[in-house]
Image (cartoon, coloured by chain):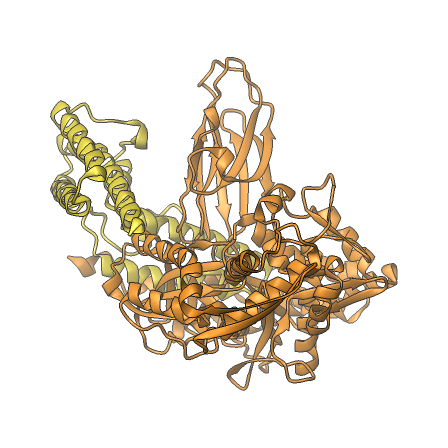
Chain colours: A yellow, B orange
């Protein structure tokens, strides 16, 4: 049965794990879409169209959640009974927060630097490295989901949110600079 | 492939009936209709062999003219000749003021939020103008194909917002058409380009039409087109290029900007001609009528033209850059760039686009026709004529959807470039003690302040139980369907008080307005309306019968026990009998009955398909 209570991983026939085979996920997503998408049922009855819309919506939601490491981690935490207040939670790690402040200052300065692009490139690659490190940590924490590890994963999600936001601001600045040329 | 046969009701075991369907490119400057015949998509010409239909409607005392004849009236009778209605559709009176002084129409002051233009034939909205164009195209298709259309696919710019989409659908309804789907123009072009024929990878579609600009980045994977991002400007197009040329001429020739309508219209036509000529020639001679002082003669060469249009081209390139970034794709990964829309004939534009994407853009299909061709292919698929077709289009929301919160800030609920259909819920709370009502203001756009976004709808949730500030939990759910249309629902969770809207009234027509217009458009109102209702009920009833028969033939044996099957067949028999009568209500009632009886069966079929699709995979595979 197409069971709405199935979890997102089960829906795609994937193991419940932070490590997801991106290619398999994409392929199964497309396989399911081929079956349920509203375009496949455009000449069906009203009820069939409604059902198809519901199921496609559900599949899209599951796919979006699993694709992105932050939402995937949050979702895994919720399967472990930990409901994060998404963006309302923030880290109390002083060292991390101080580092964030510095990075933000660097971003502001990059705008006015003579070689803005080089400065920005360097900053972005450092942020990306930090994100990758956190993702790797989370993978290990979810492999062994003790309460301590889960708490650590939750903290990592909070930090990831900071870094992702910073990265997207850096990308906007990059686009702005490119537009000026 | 066996999987599809299960979930695809179009698999008719009954004699295969080809349904008539058409794709319509409702353009700013020109429109087209196309259809698939003998497995080949083609645009349909009028009696004089012309494929394009100028999107111009001329209103006169006792009727309307659409197309070439209407366009000829544009300079002679500008106030009654509406061109570029697509620029106005789904927009509010206030937007239209800012859209341009270039519009030579008399807007009527009205209470309705839909702008109306005063003409000799009465006041008309852009929706009605578009409906006139759609009617002519649909009639052309029906005359050519020799039968009634079961449905159409109408293309819209990917960057169209909810109000513009809704208004386009309203226009189709006014024209009496069943819309299978609103399809984004760049996606349609991708289909037409036959990117499905083996070119897996990332493609960019650059679509510059008369009044709109879209850029879409999509990934093709075994027949599935996944739109990764889309961007653009729903108010930038070839017309703007004409405008800058016209402004240059005015400056050179000393024509004031408050010159009368006819002069401005003529000037726009001259500017367009000059622009088009410069696609081949290095320079063009101008001979312009100047009010009061005779004529002005001069020359416009490519160098000057390029400096005039470069700022506009730069805007399109910035949008390409943003779209790539949103898609998370590097420019090197883009396999090809497809050019769509008449305005992409400009050599300067091709040069700049090629420079940015580091490859010459593809221009082999007529950029004017490519969208209509793609729409026709998709219409054929959606009509169920191609049950074993592998093409599937997964499109996205072009703009973020959100709510206004405290201080006029926007809280995004569905970010742009989210794959549709999609539903997202977000919880909000009250900010005052004892607050019992809450205004839900739905907006669309990327800006942080609600006032800078497009306001789509505003409704109120009442009856919230009085509590201290911050204690109530109000869940607002946004749902976007496969046409990109939005539905919003708000619910107070502790008591279950609900309020919902289908987002439409802001700039669209209300249901009542549509019904009234439909009624008015039938000269012999009552009779025709009855006949139409009967015809529609029969078509709908037959659709249910055919879909079910095909389903029963393919898997009735497997999924139903004899008693269930008998039950369904009896209901089906009753519906078939009702269709033979002329009793609309009986047909509707029986059709409804069939749907009820079959509810479990439809669900079983879809589930069985999914189960099969995933059966090959299980968790063990990974261990």
**Relative to A71, residue B610 above or below:** below
In the image, taking residue B333 as reference, residue B314 lies left or right, namely: right
Residue B565 in view here: no
Quarter residue B340 falls in = bottom left
**Relative to B519, residue B275 above or below:** below
In the image, taking residue B409 as reference, residue A100 lies left or right, namely: left
Q: Residue at x 67, y 42 (%)?
A: B113
In the image, taking residue B89 as reference, residue B369 lies left or right, namely: left
Q: Nearer the viewer, residue B111 or B350?
A: B350
Q: Position of residue B366 (x, y in %)?
A: 48, 78
Q: Nearer the viewer, residue B201 or B598?
A: B201
Q: Residue at x 14, y 23 (%)?
A: A94
Q: Nearer the viewer, residue A80 or B412?
A: B412
Residue B265 in view here: yes
Q: Residue at x 82, y 58 (%)?
A: B121
Q: Position of residue B118 (x, y in %)?
A: 77, 51
In the image, taking residue A31 as reference, residue A159 lies left or right, namely: left
Quarter residue A84 falls in = top left
Q: Position of residue B159 (x, y in %)?
A: 48, 54
């Amino acid at each position: 049965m197409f069971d709405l209570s199935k979890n997102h991983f089960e829906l795609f026939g994937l193991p419940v794990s932070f490590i997801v085979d991106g290619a398999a996920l994409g392929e199964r997503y497309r396989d399911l879409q081929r079956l349920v998408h509203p375009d496949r049922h455009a000449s069906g009855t009203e009820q069939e169209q409604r059902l198809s819309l519901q199921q496609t919506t559900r599949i899209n939601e599951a796919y979006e959640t699993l694709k992105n490491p932050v939402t995937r981690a949050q979702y895994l935490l919720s399967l472990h009974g930990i409901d994060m207040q998404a963006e309302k939670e923030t880290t109390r790690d002083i060292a991390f927060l101080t580092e964030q402040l510095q990075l933000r200052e660097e971003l502001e300065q990059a705008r006015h630097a003579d070689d803005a692009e080089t400065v920005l490139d360097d900053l972005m690659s450092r942020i990306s490295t930090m994100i990758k490190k956190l993702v790797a940590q989370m993978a290990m924490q979810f492999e062994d989901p003790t309460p301590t590890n889960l708490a650590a994963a939750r903290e990592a999600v909070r930090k990831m949110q900071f870094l992702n936001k910073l990265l997207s601001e850096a990308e906007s600045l990059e686009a702005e600079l490119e537009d000026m040329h | 492939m066996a999987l599809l046969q299960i979930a695809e009701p179009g698999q008719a075991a009954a004699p295969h009936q080809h349904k008539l369907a058409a794709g319509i490119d409702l353009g700013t400057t020109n429109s087209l209709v196309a259809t698939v015949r003998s497995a080949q998509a083609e645009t349909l010409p009028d009696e004089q062999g012309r494929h394009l239909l100028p999107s111009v409607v001329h209103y006169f005392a006792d009727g309307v003219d659409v197309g070439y004849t209407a366009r000829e009236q544009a300079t002679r009778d500008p106030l009654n000749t509406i061109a570029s209605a697509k620029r106005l559709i789904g927009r509010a009176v206030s937007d239209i003021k800012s859209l341009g002084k270039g519009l030579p129409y008399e807007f009527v002051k009205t209470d309705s939020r839909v702008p109306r233009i005063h003409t000799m034939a009465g006041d008309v909205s852009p929706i009605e103008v578009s409906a006139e164009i759609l009617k002519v195209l649909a009639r052309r298709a029906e005359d050519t194909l020799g039968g009634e259309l079961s449905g159409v696919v109408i293309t819209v710019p990917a960057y169209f917002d909810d109000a513009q989409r809704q208004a386009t659908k309203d226009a189709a309804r006014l024209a009496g058409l069943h819309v299978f789907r609103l399809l984004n123009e760049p996606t349609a072009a991708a289909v037409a380009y036959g990117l499905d024929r083996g070119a897996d990878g990332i493609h960019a579609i650059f679509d510059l039409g008369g009044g709109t600009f879209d850029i879409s980045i999509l990934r093709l994977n075994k027949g599935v087109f996944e739109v990764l991002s889309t961007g653009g400007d729903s108010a930038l197009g070839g017309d703007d290029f004409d405008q800058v040329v016209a402004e240059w001429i005015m400056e050179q020739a000393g024509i004031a900007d408050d010159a009368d309508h006819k002069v401005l219209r003529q000037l726009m036509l001259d500017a367009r001609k000059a622009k088009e000529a410069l696609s081949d020639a290095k320079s063009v001679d101008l001979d312009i009528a100047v009010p009061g002082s005779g004529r002005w003669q001069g020359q416009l060469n490519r160098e000057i033209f390029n400096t005039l249009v470069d700022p506009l081209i730069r805007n399109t390139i910035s949008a390409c850059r943003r779209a790539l970034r949103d898609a998370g794709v590097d420019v090197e990964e883009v396999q090809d760039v497809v050019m769509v829309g008449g305005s992409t004939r400009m050599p300067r534009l091709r040069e700049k686009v090629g420079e940015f994407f580091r490859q010459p853009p593809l221009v082999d299909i007529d950029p004017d026709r490519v969208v209509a061709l793609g729409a026709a292919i998709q219409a054929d698929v959606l009509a169920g004529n191609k049950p074993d077709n592998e093409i599937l289009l997964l499109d996205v929301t072009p703009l973020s959807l959100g709510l206004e919160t405290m201080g006029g800030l926007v809280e995004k609920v569905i970010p742009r470039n989210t794959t549709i259909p999609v539903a997202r819920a977000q919880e909000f709370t009250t900010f005052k003690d004892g607050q019992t009502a809450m205004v839900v203001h739905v907006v669309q756009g990327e800006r942080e302040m609600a006032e800078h976004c497009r306001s789509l709808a505003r409704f109120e949730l009442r009856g919230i139980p009085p509590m201290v500030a911050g204690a109530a939990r109000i869940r607002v759910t946004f749902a976007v369907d496969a046409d990109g249309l939005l539905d919003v629902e708000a619910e107070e969770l502790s008591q279950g008080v609900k309020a919902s809207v289908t987002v439409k009234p802001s700039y669209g027509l209300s249901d009542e307005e549509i019904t009234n217009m439909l009624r008015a458009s039938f000269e012999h109102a009552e009779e025709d309306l009855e006949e139409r209702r009967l015809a529609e009920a029969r078509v709908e009833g037959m659709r249910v019968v055919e879909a079910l028969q095909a389903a029963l033939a393919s898997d009735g044996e497997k999924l139903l026990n004899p008693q269930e099957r008998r039950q369904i067949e009896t209901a089906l028999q009753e519906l078939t009998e009702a269709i033979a009568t002329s009793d609309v209500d009986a047909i509707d009632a029986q059709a409804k009955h069939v749907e009820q009886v079959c509810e479990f069966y439809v669900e079983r079929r879809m589930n069985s398909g999914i189960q099969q699709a995933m059966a090959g995979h299980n968790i063990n595979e990974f261990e």
